[in-house]
Amino acid sequence: MPETNEVSWTTMVAGYGQNGQLCAARKVFEKMPDRDVVSWNAMIAAYAQNGHSKVALKLLQQMQTTGVKPNPQTFATVLTACADLVALDQGKEVHEKIIINGLEPNIFVGNALIDMYTKCGSLENARHVFDEMSQQNVVSWTMMIVGYAENGCVEEASKLFKRMPEHDAISWNAMIAGYAQNGGSKKALNLFLQMRQRGLTPTPQTFAIVLSTCANLASLEQGKEVHEVIIRSGFQYNMFLCSALVDMYAKCGSIDYAQNVFDRMSERDAVLWNTMIAGYVHNGYIDEALDIFQKMPEKVLVSWNTMISGYAQNGCLEEAMELFNKTPERDVISWNTIIAGYAQNGHGKEAMECFRPMQQANIKPNRDTLAIVLPACVSLEQGKIFHGVIVQNGLQSNVFVGSALIDMYAKCGSIENALSVFDEIPQRDVVLWNAMIGAYAMHGCGKEALQLFEQMQQSGTNPDHVTFVGVLSACCHAGLLDEGCKYFNFMNQYFHITPAMEHYGCMVDLLGRAGRLYEAEDFINRMPIKPDAPVWGSLLGACRIHCNVELGERVAEHIFELDSTNAAPYVLLSNIYAASGRWNDVEKVRKMMKDRRVKKKPGSSWIEVNKKVYVFLVGNMFNPQMHEIYTELKRLSGLMKGAGYVPDTRFVLNDVEEEQKEHALSHHSEKLAIAFGLINTTPRTTLHIIKNLRICGDCHSAIKFIAKIVAREIVVRDANRFHHFKGGQCSCSDYW
């Protein structure tokens, strides 16, 4: 090149940028003798298009300090960078500069502003820009519709779509996808039908969205109809759509049709192979999935991960680990898959053990890793270790990880740490609010849960059905009957949420605990959906609390008709009879269980001491410290009786002498765990006990005395909730 002019320099910058060679582009840019707005735009675009949005924003500032005035192209590029970073404040600053430069009416810049605001979740600002534009084109309308749909405001998107002067395939796709992604699958299919009736030809993307919708609905017949339209449209050999068809047929349970689509393709890419493998895995056909996997001409990492996941989902952990060890290379998804396999199959310890070698392999955990590991934490100390990992990886403000962290702390007994995590996350979505409300509910902090629910509404976050499960549970555990009834009615009246089985179950539990047993029975009989066994079980539990034999017998019959294999209702009915001294009926229930081969789950409790977990069963004699444990229990028993404790022998389910009943009560698993904790920890150490069943009334009373005598806090998590015992009182105020 004989002479390098400004255009040549700029072309080189743009070329290097388009090929991802940023260092080379910047070197050329720095050597330029003169830089005009086009040169600056090329350099800014190079950074923005290669994922370096922060650098692109800094370059805009440098550009202005040199006296070069930005043009519409400059602002559009920078706004794209703000959208990628979800940097709303910086986007607003750029918007102000646009106004100062008098460029806002420009369609090109206006569309970039709409795109930035919608991607940052600021729909009000996006709509203001849209409405103020002197002229909108099809891109403006479509961006606004997509913005509403992707932010869950599908009805607003629909209103705008109806007002749109002219619809193209992209706007139809946006609206169909909006319904499909926001729970309106049937509306999405109806819209697809309208699109075809108006003579518009669906694109491959349209078909992919609709096939995904059919898969979500498990609507095989509609899926077949869409398949026919695809064939008539000439897209039957489109690789992208074939993968979508295989996925749809597999998720509809028609694996033979999926295999047929797969077999008809003479050429197959990795996505199609992996979709076929995933289809067999989804339907539980692991051998067939393995056969496809082995036939793959070139196995990519996704293929290995899919097979590992398939084995894990079907409980074949040895095979999953064997395949994991054979994987040529592993990414974070590979590790997440094997960790999740262990965690979801009840092997929390093994899930934890996988985490260390993952770090040793220099694989950085992501939010999914930590959300999988956190529920597997069985102790507060373990949870704190992983909290440290979260901070080290800069994920402490991530709402997904934060929700899992709140849930972990709550389940490990530390509501204070859960609240601390919640307070440190500035941007909160409905899942995060739900996690904290649920944490309060679990610990019986009913008033705090309701106050948080009010704050949630004031923040502008709309509650969902999970929110109300937490709110109603909080009312149950705190005995807030009037508040529970009010919020149950508010669900449909103000928030248009139809109550589900879980909400009805909470209401039955709430009424039953309050002693309004017959009102609870009437509530069940008036339910618009058929009550399941757990709903009736809540009422049976209330009959146990209030010793109502007649109603308890009637309720138990309903449960046995729905599920005769669960031991819990038999045990509750037996407890009701035992508390009433009806020992013959107790024996009848036991015989019924024996005849139906129903086995009662033994009560067990566990405690962590010095980073080791110890498990205790009723009457456990296998711990090497059993002599010291029983000696400690005997010592405590004397002190407790001296302080006014009287054993409640109604909770002994055998017709024996009072002295034998007292002896049986003293050997309940939670008391053994507490005694073990007392003799193996330093004074004033808080004891954390987990019990697999609901704590009995006698143990509840006894632990209040023990906590006061030994001047310690004792936290017990039973099958229903947390109990914080301190100074002779329990956080549940004896309402559980």
Image (tube, rainbow, N blue to C red):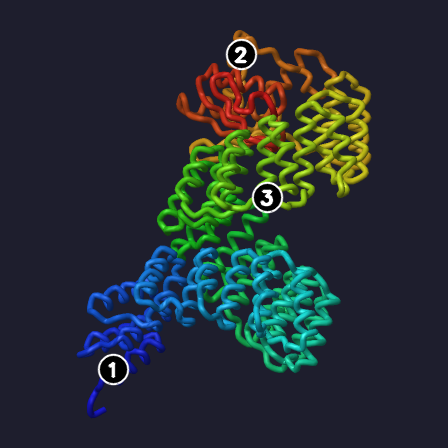
Q: Is residue 133 above or below residue 639?
A: below
Which percent across, then down, holds residue 368? 48, 53
Viewer-side residue, 265 vs 147: 147
Q: Judge from the rendering whether residue 557 lies leftward or rightward of residue 661; answer left or right.
A: right
Residue type at mark 2?
Answer: Met
Cα gap from disc 2 to disc 3, whole angstroms:
42 Å
Which percent across, then down, holds residue 186? 68, 61
Q: Judge from the rendering whether residue 193 lies leftward or rightward of residue 730; answer left or right.
A: right
Residue at 63% in and 62% down: 281
Q: Residues within 10 Å of mark 3 (few under 14, many from 20)?
A: some
Residue located beneath label 1 in the image? 9
Q: Is residue 584 above or below residue 104?
A: above
- Indicate the quadrant containing the N terminus: top left, top right, bottom left or bottom right: bottom left
- Indicate the quadrant containing the C terminus: top left, top right, bottom left or bottom right: top right
Mark closer to the chain start, 2 or 3: 3
Residue type at mark 3?
Answer: Val
Residue located beneath label 2 in the image? 640
Residue type at mark 1?
Answer: Trp
Residue located beneath label 3 in the image? 466
Q: Residues within 10 Å of mark 2 (few under 14, many from 20)?
A: many
Q: Is residue 484 above or below residue 394?
A: above
Task: Work out which residue is located at the far left of the displayed protein and give it.
Answer: 33
Task: Work out which residue is located at the far bottom of the displayed protein and give it.
Answer: 2
Q: Residues within 10 Å of mark 1 (few under 14, many from 20)?
A: many
Mark closer to the chain start, 3 or 1: 1
Which percent across, then down, holds residue 212? 63, 65
Circle 1: element type: helix
Determine whether label 2 and label 3 are within 8 Å by CB. Answer: no
Quadrant of residue 589 within the rendered picture: top right
Circle 2 or circle 3, nearest the eye: 3
